[in-house]
Image (tube, rainbow, N blue to C red):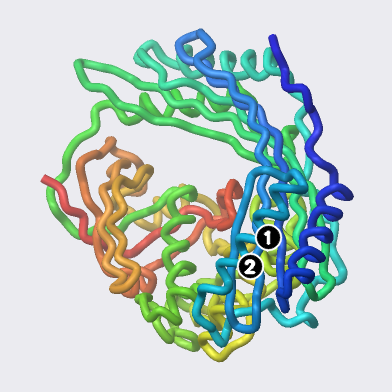
Amino acid sequence: MTVPARQEPLNNIELERLVATALDDARAKGADQAEVGISHYLGLSATARLGDVESLEYTNDRSLGITVYFGQRKGNASTSDLSAAAIKETIAKACTFAEHTAADKCAGLADADLMATNIPELELCHRWPISADEAIRVALETESAALGFDKRITNSEGATVSTSHGVRAYGNSHGFVHSYSKSSHSVSCSVLSKQDGEMQRDYWYSVSRDPATLDSPQSVGAKAGERAVSRLGARKIKTTKAPVLYVPELARGFVGHALGAISGGAQYRKSSFLLGAAGQKIFPEFFQIQERPHIPRAMGSSAYDNEGVATTDRDIVIDGELQGYVLSSYSACRLGLKTTGNAGGVHNAVVPGNADSQQELLSVMGTGLLVCELIGQGVNGVTGDYSRGAVGFWVENGEIAYPVHEVTIAGNLRNLYQRIVGVGKDQDTRGSIRCGSLLVESMTIAGA
C-alpha cells in the first residue's frame, strides 16, 4: 500500500519562523499592524461498509492566513501553499485589499497587554501511530460489532476511523509568536435496522485528543446497533404539551443557542434574542455556565484565542443571571466593552449538573418525551423562536414506553430556558460545550 512521502507535519520551529518572516514582510510593505496564522495537519481516515473497504484517505492540510492593517483599513488573504514565493504573494494581496477597504475605527489587533504570556501545558497532542491497514481493521471491527448486535440490523452506512495531528502557529506585530501541537481521533458507525417492513437508522461515535481514551470499536459498534434497534416500532403521538428531556449530545446544542445569542457579533448587529441581556435572569436559579479553557486534553481547550489574547476561567452565567457576552477585540470595540478572549468562540463551556443521572431526570419528568435526535434547522437567532423535528421515546411513569417519530418540538428559547428544571451530571465531553441530559418542564409537541 502506497503511503505519503512525508510522515511529519512542519514542526513548531519551522512554523514560527514562517510567521516571523511573514510579519517582517508585511511591515516592510508598510503595514502598521499585522497578524499571521499558519497550520499544518496530517491525517488518515478509513471507512468500511458491509465488510469491505469503502474509502481510504490521507490528508495533508497546510494553510496560512494573514491580516494587515494600514491605519484603520484592513485586508486579509490566505493560501494553502507555504512556499516563500506564495507567502510573499499572499501578503502582497492582503496589502492591496487593504487599500480598497473603508476605514473602520475598530480595526486592529487586540491590546498588546492582553497577549498570553504564561502558556499552560494543555496536553492537546497525542499521536495515534496507526497504519492504514490497522485503521481498516478497526473500522471493520466496529462495523462487525454493530451488524452482529441483533439480527434486525440489516444494512450499514459504514464505520469510519479518523486520526489527525499537527501544529498551529500564530503571531502578530505586538511581538507575540507561539505555536502548539494538537490531535483529534475518532471512531464512528451508522447502521440500519429493519422489522416488519419498517426501517430505522442510528449511529454512535467516540472522539478524543488521546487515542487511549477512545471507546473500543466493539462498544461503538454495539451502541450504534442498540440505538438503531431501539427505534423500531416508532409511533406517532397526538399534539400535546409535555416535558421534554434532551440527551447530553443534544443538550449541548440547546445551550449553544444561548452562547450564539450572546456572541459579540450577534449583539452589535442587533440580531440576537438575548440583545442587551447582560445582568438579566436568563435561566433558573440553579443554572450555571462556566468557561474553563484550560482543561487538559479537552476538545475546546486553548491557552489563547485567535488573536493571542490569554484565556482565563470565567463564569458566563451565575445562578441563572447572564454576566456578560462572548467577545473578540473587534466586537468588544463595537460595543464599547473589553474583549473576553473569545475570538474564535468559547473554550469549554461547562454546565454543572444538579441531578445525578438521566434516569433521575426521567423519574422527575414522569410522562413526556425523551429526545434523541433533532431534524432541521428551525431556530431563529433573532426572535428565539424554536421549532425542530424530533425523534426519541415516549416516557410514562419515569420509564421509556415506546419509540416516537414524526413529531416537532417548539417554543421560544427565552421562555424555554426559564423552564429548565434539571441538568444531569452525565456530561458529553466530545465538544466545546459540556452538558448533561437537560429537562425542560413543558414544550409544545406537535404530532399527528
Q: Does 141 sit above or below residue 378?
A: above
Q: Amino acid at mark 1?
A: Ile
Q: Does 252 sit above or below residue 401?
A: below
Residue sitting nearer the eye, 187 or 119: 119
Q: Amino acid at mark 2?
A: Cys
At 75% from the left edge and 71% from the top edge, which residue is drawn?
A: 310
From mark 1 to mark 2, how far is it between C-alphas?
6 Å
At 39% from the left edge and 30% from the top edge, which residue is drawn?
A: 202
Q: Does 115 sit above or below residue 138?
A: below
Position of the C terminus, as image quadrant, is top left
Where does residue 160 sit, x and y in percent of width and height? 55, 25
At 36% from the left edge and 48% from the top edge, which residue is drawn?
A: 398
Q: Is residue 317 left or right of residue 420?
A: right
Which residue in the protein does label 2 denote?
95
Which residue in the protein does label 1 denote?
91
Can residue 349 be seen from the camera position used here? no
Position of the N terminus, as image quadrant, is top right
Where does residue 84 sit, x and y in percent of width and height? 77, 48
Can residue 19 be seen from the camera position used here? yes
